[in-house]
Amino acid sequence: MTILIDNKAKVKESLQPKGLLRYFSFSLDHKVIGIQYLVCGFLFYLVGGTLASAIRIELISPLSDFLPRDVYNQVLTLHGTIMIFLWIVPVVNGAFGNYLIPFYVGARDMAFPRLNAVAFWLIPPSGLMLIASYFIEGAAQSGWTAYPPLSITTPQSGQIIWILSVLLLGGSSIFGGINFIVTILKLRRPGLKLMNLPMYCWAMLGTSILVVLSTPVLAGTLILLSFDIVAHTGFFNPALGGNVVVYQHLFWFYSHPAVYIMVLPAFGLVSEILPIHCRKPLFGYTTMVFSIMGIVVLGLVVWAHHMFTSGTPPWMRLFFTIATAFIAVPTGIKFFNWVATMWGGKISLNSAMLFSCGFIINFVFGGITGVALAQVPFDIHVHDTYFVVAHFHYIVYGGSVFVIFSSIYHWYPKVVGKLLNENLGYLHFALTFIGFNLCFAPQHWLGLNGMPRRVAEYDPQFQFVNQISSVGALFMAISTIPFLVNIFVSFKKGKIAGNNPWNALTPEWLTSSPPPVENWEGEAPLVREPYGYGKDYLS
Amino acid sequence: MTILNSSDEIKKREDDLDNHHEDFRIFGLIIFLIADGMTFAGFFAAYLTYKAVNPLPEGSIYELELSIPTLNTILLLISSATFHKAGKALVNQKNDLSQKWLIITASLGITFLICQLFEYFHLPFGLTDNLFASTFYALTGFHGLHVTLGTLMILIISWQIRINGGRITYKNMFPLEAVELYWHFVDGIWVILFIILYLY
């Protein structure tokens, strides 16, 4: 049987392009697809980051002098859309999911490799299309939420391209989600039970359920919106008897779960990284599983807390406030589990660990402002101000993006076979952490004092704090330089990592680095206890 | 020791997994159909909300005839049954019979589409006349798109089921089973749509 597999692997290998060329081909190998997602996502992150820099430069002064107002609107729309749909969602789901899930379930590939490749190759064209819309008649100007009537009255071509692009990305996301659910539930190695799986599998299962249930609703909504724009129907146009609030309900039915689609996989990744670098078992595995599933269920019924100022009736406010506050419970359980995992552990404070710790600190801060925002009176006060901007950047940047960097430091030796330089990693972390907090912490103050978001001009009294924020953004922009240098230099000259540089027990480390085409020479190892650290058989 | 090399039974299942790779395609399709169903759920939710909170302006025309949609419902229900017959025939290795049932199913689908177009052309309102009209065309049109795709797929598999050289046989049932599942799904959506849009 082993010979048969070897032959199969050889035939498969001989048909694929070699070396770096593989990453530009329609490869069916889950590891290649994972890296494709990651690199493609990172390129879009650089674009989105450039746009963010443009926003921060514009906000150094209270007047709209660097960017005209309509260009400012396009820039913030593109920034939001690119960062969400082309960077965080594809990377925390597609990149790490495709790379790790087959290892974790003990399979040789995902359940549907072709569907997987299709899902990836939908992303670059739709991303390029979105960026290109800026150069045609101007990109969409209505923000990443595309609320009507704004999205109906602003120039049409950009908005329509935006809709098409988001529809394609949504399709990609759904195909990915189907693949993950089938792989995790059906492709597990014989003898491996669901409760033996590493936590990232549970996180991806929960995320994929959210993707499959909520993304199609967004697709339907955007189809209706495009009817409004192109065919002049009146679904969301009050002048024609329509109802804008219906759009908001349908949109947030996807876009609130989208927050969990961005952050649940990050939870999973952190749960993989912490035990390895603390040399302790993950604290409270079962509670972690139940809290993930709790977040999935609750995440689907809290969407209207984005709409407390949209004329929501009192019963709706009451229900959605309570439901939202409830989410703090499973999230809090996860937070305490991570802290308890670190407690008394033999912590090695390397770059991966530093970014994970940074994540925990930022995320708890973003979580606290989140609970505050769920309260109707407070939400009405700060709605559409910089307080909200600060809150969600603490979740998606301080949360998800910190975890992405942490994961890159952690899994780079697996993918490349060489270690990243730790000193450059420390520099990267210091710049990112200081820059991030310097950029977004002052924005809480701005929001509480009433500075509205999405406007190029502001009251001069806010200038000083905005300048502090822009300095923070400068630090964040600079922080990508040591990171990129590190990636390229270590690729050539990095220290050879060996197969298992972290002495980890999770299955992806039990094969060679980089792994062979079908993941294992011979059969997959059966790992029933992926977090069995601190016991004497592996010191 | 956590890393185990396992018992004979597990070994045997492993051989199965490596050499045959169990078929998960139907399971994947079911998840896709759940996702597709959520799109319709979004449309239904929008329609019901409009009905509840957005009264149409005075003098809006929104009358629907029941005769054609009722006929259409019957057509689709029959087509589900004929598709089932086709599957049965294929299991019994009667490819020509299976092909006949499939062609009957496809004709029922085409008749459904013709009837719907006929209804569209004879309705007293157009796409942009009022909110009800827009929602009506969006919902039935999106469903009609599903029927069109389904009919095309049925025609393709009915060609592939031909006796000499077709790739669908009783050993390779998947394409037929997949399209059948999809067709029943589209059928079910129509029944819900018929109840919500025409009867309720």
Image (tube, coloured by chain):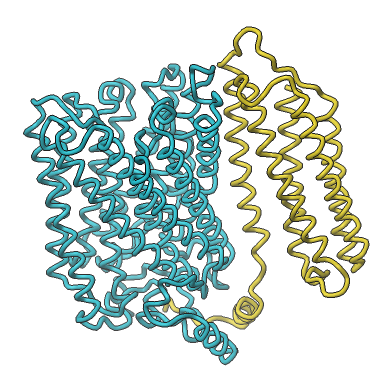
Chain colours: A cyan, B yellow
Q: Nearer the viewer, residue A152 or B190?
A: A152
- The structure residue drawn at horizontal position 29% and vertical position 75%, both measured from the top left corner, is A413
Badge count: 0
Residue at figure coordinates x 26%, y 21% from the top left? A381
List x then y, in percent, for residue A227: 55, 33
> Residue A275 occupies which quadrant of the picture?
bottom left
Q: Residue at x 40, y 40 (%)?
A: A158
- Image side of residue B28 versus residue A298, left or right: right
Q: Residue A115: horizontal and vertical position, in percent?
A: 56, 63
The answer to whether any part of residue B74 appears in the image is yes
Left or right? Give the position of A493 relative to A468: right
Q: Residue A440's x, y, as percent?
A: 18, 41
Q: Between residue A373 and residue A72, name the one nearer to us.
A: A72
Could you tell whether A470 is left or right of A42 in the image? left
Residue A312 in picture, x, y percent from top left: 43, 19
Foreground residue, A402 or A484?
A: A484
Q: Residue furthest left?
A: A464
Please state which of residues A301 and A344 is positioned toward the viewer in this rendering. Answer: A301
In the rendered view of the protein, which quadrant contains the N terminus of chain A? bottom right
